[in-house]
Image (cartoon, rainbow, N blue to C red):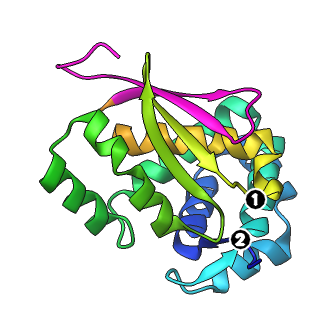
Amino acid sequence: MPEPRILAGFVQGTLDTVRQVEGRTGLRIAERLPAETVARVRKALPVSWLPLQLDVELTAALFDGAGTEEAVRVFRDAMAGSMDKSFLGPLVRGAVALLGRSPERLLRWAPKVWSAIYRDAGDLAVGPHPEGLVLEWLHAPRLAASQRDYLLGIAGAVEGALAALRIESQCRLEEPADDPTFIVRWKDPGSER
């Protein structure tokens, strides 16, 4: 089976956001980031693929240095920033042009965004849920699925994607689940979800 990979530009965006964290928290994060991992991520072309293990390592360092709340904020901000960048920008603009700003319609487009970020790392399925929608990471690689912090980072990224579209949302990790599962709720003028 091929090694799970992630788009280098996405990981680089997270690193850029981490660099903006100031003060003691920023120093604690920097101390925990493996220098060889950071160098490998920085040297990669944004459109190349990196082993998912590197992203898992960076996520662990971020949560360890910043704590859960700050780390989730970093992932939220990183994804919000990625929405305007080259690799996700055209995809997002196309989705909004086709689907409008409906959170439900846009979230149903999430598997396309997922496949632009991950390779050989499972699939994202979207389905109905009484509170909004459920996102399920099918066939998730164990190296990521077994790391609660990594999954919380994904939840933050989902919130960041919607925030970039001016949609207030909450993405909650459901535990335990055979496949990592997230419940997404949102507020918009047409919905109270």
How many numbered tags mark residues here? 2
Q: Earlier in the sequence, mark 1 or mark 2?
A: 2
The answer to whether residue 53 is left or right of residue 7 is: right
Quarter of the image that includes the C terminus: top left
In-front residue for pair 109/58: 109
Type of amino acid at the residue the image marks with label 1 = Pro
Q: Amino acid at mark 2?
A: Pro
Q: Quadrant of the N terminus?
A: bottom right
* Whether label 1 touches label 2, CB < 8 Å: yes
Q: Alpha carbon of mark 1 to alpha carbon of mark 2: how far? A: 7 Å
- 106 sits left or right of 140 in the view: left
Image height of 181 relative to 21, above or below: above
Q: Position of residue 190 (x, y in %)?
A: 17, 19
Q: Quadrant of residue 100?
A: top left
Q: Position of residue 113 (x, y in %)?
A: 42, 59
Residue ID at (62%, 58%): 19
**Residue 74 appearing in the image:** no
- Is 111 on the left-hand or right-hand side of 109? right
Image position, residue 144 (x, y; %): 76, 54
Say which residue label 1 marks.
141
Query: Which residue range is magenta in the image?
Result: 168-193
Residue beneath label 2, please?
Answer: 4
Residue 191 highlighted magenta (yes or no): yes
Label 1: element kind: loop
Residue 176 among those drawn in magenta: yes
